[in-house]
Amino acid sequence: MGEPTGMRLCNAHAGKVAYRIDLTAASGHSSRAGTEPTAVHEGAALVALVQGLNDPDRGISANVGSIHGGVAVNVLSPSCTLEFEVRHQADTDPDEVLAGVLEAVAEADRRLSAVGGHVTIESFIDYPGLETDPSLAPVAAMVDLVGCGAPGPVGFGTEGGLYSDRLGVPSVIVGPGDIADAHRPNETVAPDQLEQCGDVLRRTIYRFCSDDGPAAVGIAPVDHPS
């Protein structure tokens, strides 16, 4: 997979799920607050639950990226929408992580239904984590081709998890650039990394697509750093 790893070979990354929750309720005067549920109050409770999913020791991160709702400070909020994501390790079942949140969504729906409202939840991102065995021959070949040490994890997701999970195809990640520069103005890629990437791609094609391997076409072994 070609992604900005600084030309460091990576064999693992987290999986990710993302959801949108829409809540509706009856509008009313704010003096009735506390006597009936509101969309924003129920949404805020769900935000707190999502925040509680964060567990660095298990490699789980949860973030509510956006929340919108309400119409005025003196009106019981008739609507609220929030979007959140959960990133998890390849061997973690996201359904297990989210079980408490999904149960709370159902409970909120029951409360809001009593005032003519409802809650819906929709998944809009779902990709598995990646954890490719570094002892596999193709991975060892890529270590040689990239000219690096043992592969390690990367902090963002790629299609590699899908190829591995759905197709059983071992996947690794390497490419020029730094993810810290992504999705912001003035993204840059160092010219020397572009040159290194081109060389790695040529070597990879020769190694995997040539009957005789790189020696047959005069490709010298890559020197490993000390």
Image (tube, rainbow, N blue to C red):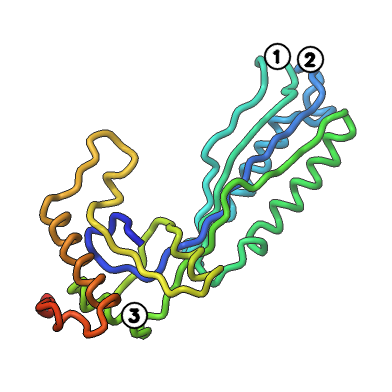
Q: Is residue 55 shown left or right of residue 28?
A: left
Residue 74, label in figure: 1
Question: What residue do we see at 79% from left, 27% from top?
Answer: 25
Q: Which mark, residue 29? A: 2
Q: Any mark on residue 65, and which?
A: none
Please report whichever mark, 2 or 3, sits nearer to the chain's N-terminal start.
2
201 lies left or right of 72: left
Viewer can see residue 127: yes
Identify the residue at horizontal 58%, vertical 33% (top origin): 67
Image marks 2 and 3: residues in contact by CB distance under 8 Å: no
Residue 150 seen in the figure: no
The quarter of the picture where the N terminus appears is bottom left
Sequence-first tag of 1 and 3 = 1
Residue beneath label 3, please?
A: 138
**How much space separates mark 1 and mark 2, taking CA atoms?**
6 Å
Report x, y in % for residue 109.
Answer: 81, 40
Q: Secondary structure at mark 1?
A: loop
